[in-house]
Image (tube, rainbow, N blue to C red):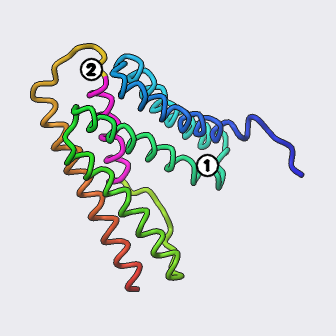
């Protein structure tokens, strides 16, 4: 039996912490405790950068981390967008788009696996940009609520940017998957 090494497990523990913060952030959004929701979201978002840095810098990458990290990212983003749509801060159509893209990707991976043609999951540049913009937009929206700021033209611009990148990312993943499945 292997002994537990706290340092080697640190990135995964941080990722698990991010998962634990998801329901906390959602509860705060539902309660309209905007300052707390913003702080929890920012903490969770920063933890993503920290666990990634630690894993790369100290060669602490693991198979578990490769699965947990994107799961934690998706749990956070999907939950935040759903909660913001439910309370009427972001359009439901944007949330449906964000969630549908992730469901499409997971569905494609599962179908590939079931059909015996597993596909390698690699984050693409467009996907990384999409995730970054989704996080930034959610942070901007939560920050505006927390600090009583009006977004004026930034809200429609942010919605358009998130929607465009989400569609572009979905299209690239779909094209790759179709090539993989027909090859």
Q: Which secondary structure dominates the residues rendered in magenta?
A: helix
Helix, strand, or loop for circle 1?
Answer: helix
Q: Secondary structure at mark 2?
A: helix
Report the side of 154 relative to 173 (left or right): left
Residue at 35% from the left image edge and 41% from the top image edge: 132
Residue 132 on the magenta segment: yes
When asked about the image quadrant of residue 159, the answer is: top left
Judged from this view, the residue extending furthest toward the right is 1
- Closer to the camera in the image, 32 or 121: 32
Residue 65 numbered tag: 1
Crowdedness near tag 1: few (<14), some (14–19) or many (≥20) residues, C-alpha within 10 Å: many
Q: Quadrant of residue 135?
A: top left
The segment highlighted magenta reads 126-142
Position of 177 compared to 87: left or right?
right
Residue 72: where, in percent of width, then height? 51, 44
Q: Residue 3: horizontal and vertical position, in percent?
A: 86, 44
Residue 59 image point, x, y percent: 66, 45
Q: Residue at x 29, y 60 (%)?
A: 170
Q: Is residue 134 magenta?
A: yes
Total numbered labels placed on residues in the image = 2
For label 2, the residue is 145
Q: Nearer the viewer, mark 1 or mark 2?
A: 2
Classify the position of the C terminus by image quarter: bottom left
Work out whether mark 1 precedes mark 2 in sequence or the reverse, and give the earlier one. Answer: 1
Q: Decide: few, some or many residues near mark 2? Use Cα within 10 Å; few <14, some 14-19, many ≥20.
A: many
| Residue 140 higher or lower than 135, as above or below | above
Q: Which mark is residue 4?
A: none
Q: Do residues under tags 1 and 2 come within 8 Å of each other at their CB atoms?
A: no
Q: Residue furthest bottom?
A: 183
Of all residues, the one furthest to the top in this rendering is 147
Residue sitting at x 52%, y 75%: 113
Please report the residue visible at 71 percent of the width from the left and 40 percent of the height from the top.
9
């Amino acid at each position: 039996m292997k002994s537990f090494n706290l340092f080697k497990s640190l990135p995964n523990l941080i990722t698990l912490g991010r998962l634990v913060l998801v329901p906390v952030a959602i509860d705060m959004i539902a309660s309209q405790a905007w300052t707390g929701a913003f702080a929890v979201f920012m903490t969770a978002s920063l933890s993503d950068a920290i666990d990634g840095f630690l894993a790369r810098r100290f060669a602490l990458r693991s198979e578990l981390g490769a699965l947990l990290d994107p799961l934690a990212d998706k749990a956070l983003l999907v939950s935040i967008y759903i909660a913001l749509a439910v309370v009427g801060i972001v359009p439901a159509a944007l949330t449906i788009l964000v969630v549908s893209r992730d469901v499409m990707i997971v569905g494609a991976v599962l179908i590939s696996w079931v059909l015996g043609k597993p596909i390698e999951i690699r984050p693409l540049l467009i996907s990384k940009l999409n995730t970054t913009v989704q996080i930034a937009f959610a942070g901007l929206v939560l920050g505006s609520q927390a600090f009583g700021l009006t977004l004026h033209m930034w809200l429609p611009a942010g919605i358009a940017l998130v929607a465009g990148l989400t569609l572009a990312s979905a299209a690239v993943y779909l094209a790759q998957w179709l090539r993989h499945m027909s090859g």
